[in-house]
Image (cartoon, grey):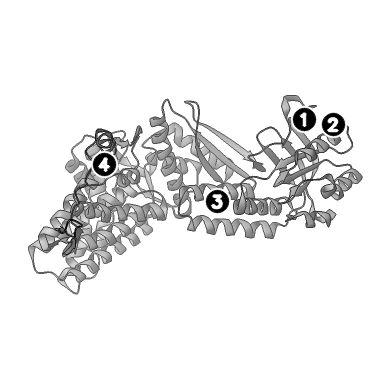
Amino acid sequence: MLSRLGRSGGTSVRSFTKDVRFGVEARSLLLQGVNILANAVAATLGPKGRNVLIEQLLISPRITKDGITVAHNVQLKDRRQDMGVQLLREASNNTNNNVGDGTTTATILARGIACQGMHALRQAEINVQLLREGILEGSRAVCEALGEMSVPVDTIGQVEAVAKVALNGDERLAELIGDTILELGESGVILLKESQSPVDEVKIQEGITLPLGYCSPFFASKSEGKTLELGNCLLLLTLAKIEQAEQILPALQLAKVREQPLLIIAQDFSSDLVKILVLNHLQGRVQVCAVKAPKFGEDQRQEMQDLALAMGAHLLEDATWLAELSEGDLGEVVLAVVDAKETHLLQPIKVNEAQVEGRIQHIRELIDEAVTDEELDRLKTRLGRMQGHMATIYVGGTSDLEISERKDRFNDALHAVKVAISDGVVPGGGTAFLRCIPALDKLPPARVMEHQVGREIVRDALRLPCYTIARNAGVDPDEVLRRVLAGNGNFGYDAAAGEYGDLLVRGIVDPTNVMQSAITDAAGVASLLATTEVLITEQPIKRKIPKNQITQDLAKLVGM
């Protein structure tokens, strides 16, 4: 408690105390937040899951079935309940960061484990640390059982099956992803962008494509369709700003002697130089074209270094390097196609494969460490260029809301497919978790009572994904659970068709690593939630809003 003396001589008191809750009361408040978040996220699970509509300040609402998007938008006014939301969100964030999918499943499992753990603490005197150890031990056993039942992904049909589940049963979109991966291969780079039309389309780019075209349309004035094609073309790559023709005279002379066209990609060109190059080009002295390097600053340097390695050229850092240019500094491609917006470089002739592969590996390591979506997109674009081929899926829709929702699903599907290809798949629909229950029953007898209670908590939570999918499909979830548990192997419930059968045959599968990550992250976060004894939060502060009408209206607009 602090106090200060006001100017008038009176004393005004400002409180900095915090709200402290203990035991059952603390866990009850956390659980209220956990249930609100889990109920919102669980509504999206399965092929018949519901949409969630999210308000966005000053712009149109967002509609989505993406669990992580829903989780990020749940924020409660009561800070004690919001602490539960934040902790549960941590489970979905961990799963999303690790494998990019399975966030809804992780949230449902975490809620189940947390609820059962809190219930156990109310029933008896329990060592909370030993209980947490039992929960984590049970989750490890489940992960091992999932690994044993995993089957590899060998065909495009299996890839499409994984994508179809992530896309909530949309077969056409799953086929589109399957066709794209068939074209690019397992390591192909796929980017997602919003389309300006209602139709989804895929554009495959072979070779290297730069998002900038020629500096002047006069370079293509003699070509049909305003596209310039340079066959057997030499490449000059530099980070210098070229002001005068003398700076690139060695390269122009070399191109003239070899009777080959020259494509110059530089940081910038003076207007006078562009006029000289266009005149040379039109008069037939040297067939030449000038293109500005993409990006700015350090991003530009990295992308130009990528380009130099991929094209077998040397990146000339400044004008001094240009003056000392030799034949070995130039790259060479079978064909360069340049238009007003893009530059395509096809089939480089001299490339150091070892250096290119090293660069590709370096970019992949950067991708694994990327934090933001913008950074990830930029690195994936660089990777696609280095590999010489990439695909862009343009996601269409009749409105911004629809495009946003479909893009979320596409993104989940691409992550799921990537993980499935690398680690295999297990039966979907929550069936894989149900088949892990016998693995928990076969564990050696627990040394202490708390370990056994922890195993039972995990055992009960494994029923929840199948139960939630069935409930969202509008059928009796208890009956579905009973019938699936009575079966064995891949037998499970197809919620989209409302039928039972072999889920692998029906193409209802989940990536193994996604399921392992979901149970691991859920157990880690939920066991901390369940064993919380003290909850400390800030006291709510009532904002003081000036009384004039304009500020009151603004305050209402932003929810104050």
Residue at the far bottom: name it: 447
Q: Quadrant of the N terminus?
A: bottom left
Drawn side of residue 179 relative to residue 476, left or right: right
Q: Residue at x 72, y 25 (%)?
A: 225
Residue that label 2 marks:
282
Relative to 512, say whether 1 is above or below.
below
Q: Earlier in the sequence, mark 3 or mark 1?
A: 1
Q: Secondary structure beneath disc 2?
A: helix
Q: Residue farthest to the front?
A: 8
Are dots 2 and 1 in contact, CB under 8 Å?
yes
Which of the numbered marks, if any, corresponds to residue 469?
4
- Considering only order in the chain, which callout, 4 or 1, is on the residue closer to the N terminus? 1
Q: Earlier in the sequence, mark 2 or mark 4?
A: 2
Cα separation between marks 2 and 4: 67 Å
Residue 271 image position (x, y, % from top left): 75, 38
Q: Amino acid at mark 1?
A: Phe
Q: Secondary structure at mark 1?
A: helix
- The residue beneath circle 1 is 218
Q: Secondary structure at mark 3?
A: helix
Q: Nearer the viewer, mark 2 or mark 4?
A: 2
Extreme-left residue of the structure: 123
Mark in front: 3 vs 1? 1
| Quadrant where the image shows the C terminus | top left
Q: Residues within 10 Å of mark 3 (few under 14, many from 20)?
A: many
Query: In which quarter of the view is residue 504 placed?
Result: top left
Q: Which residue is mark 3?
A: 379
Where does the image place residue 94, in percent across and percent down from the top left?
Answer: 36, 56
